[in-house]
Image (cartoon, grey):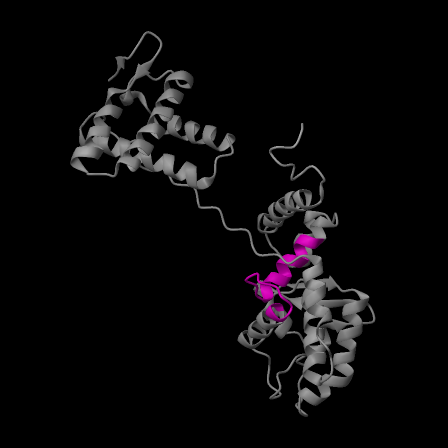
Amino acid sequence: MRKKEDENKIEFYEISNFKFYLEDDMGSPINTVNAYISDLRQYQDFLVKYENINDVSEITREDILRYIESLKRKDLSKTSIARKITAIKDFHRYLCKEENIRDNPALLIDNPKPDKPLPVVLSKDEINKMISSIDQEDVLSIRNRAMMELLYAAGLRITELLDLTVRELHLKEKYVSVIGKGDKERLVPIGDMAVSYVRKYVEHARPILMKDKNTFLLFFNYKGEKMSRQGFFKYIKKLAIDNGITKNISPHTIRHSFATHLLEGGVDLRIVQELLGHEDISTTQIYTHIDKSRLKEMYDETHPLAKRGEDDDI
């Protein structure tokens, strides 16, 4: 059903009825009602203008999907799109309840999955500050420096680092063989710095920490046992705090930073995918968003006109 509000505007009167339903029957907050009606007016305008629909009974699932695609092209956030879809679904549910329509075209429409928050990333200076602060005055410090160097040099997951064995080190050739998720092996190159500190650990600290055990495991705690995830997590948190870094970090933050710094340096996304051991490149693509975000931050911090005041001459 429809009525003419003026010569050029078609209005679904059911939207006004839905507004009264939300206010009177449901007791919805006025802000919620206004948001719903605003979203539905936009929905209506699209249907009338682009789908040539003059009656709610003419709306199909395909019409709704085309409207959702139009929202995506506007670069709206997934949260905003989800809110608009919720309004549409509730509206069509109401139309069925009031028997304005027989079938609900919005019944199987899914809300978009919410955007995942971008992971925390350390700057190159923050990484260097943390790693270089490890003094290496005892076997544990030598171990810690080797672990941090290797973690950042190869972008390892914490479990991959802790599961490493000496057989998977190829220091002369400057790479490590990593067994990742699904027991898939990948070869990851490492730089001279990591090679140097890992070699120092293997030659001088590992024989002491392993306490005469017959094992190929690379890293041990002070008891001569395998390092735990929790133990290394606590260590890296303390290392960050001791260096004045207030970001909420974990061992995985080093992996995030590894990937981001490679992309910032111009490394191809496919190569980063291979180094990280991602099966699907869409998992790696999150780092392109971080790279763009950091690019904006760097621009704001360094460009002489980025922070021009409102009173400055133009």
Which of the 4 image quarters holds residue 212? bottom right
Tell me where residue 290 appears, x and y as whole percent. 61, 48
Would you say residue 306 sits in the magenta stretch?
A: no
Residue located farthest toward the right when viewing the structure as drawn: 172
Q: Which residue is at the far top?
A: 7
Check the image and name the residue furthest to the bottom: 212
The quarter of the picture where residue 4 lies is top left
Please name whichever residue, 14 or 99, is drawn nearer the observer in this view of the structure: 14
Q: Which residues are magenta?
A: 240-261
Q: Is residue 256 above or below residue 241?
A: above
Quadrant showing the N terminus = top left
Query: Is there any visible trace of residue 258 in the rendered image?
Result: yes
> Which residue is located at x 51 percent, y 30 percent?
73
Location of residue 199 with respect to 80 vertically, above or below: below
- When asked about the image quadrant of residue 197, the answer is bottom right
Please name the residue shown 57% across and 70% down the image: 237
Q: Is residue 98 left or right of residue 72?
A: left
Residue at 68% x, 49% y is 270
Instruction: State whether the magenta stretch is mostly helix, strand or loop.
Output: helix
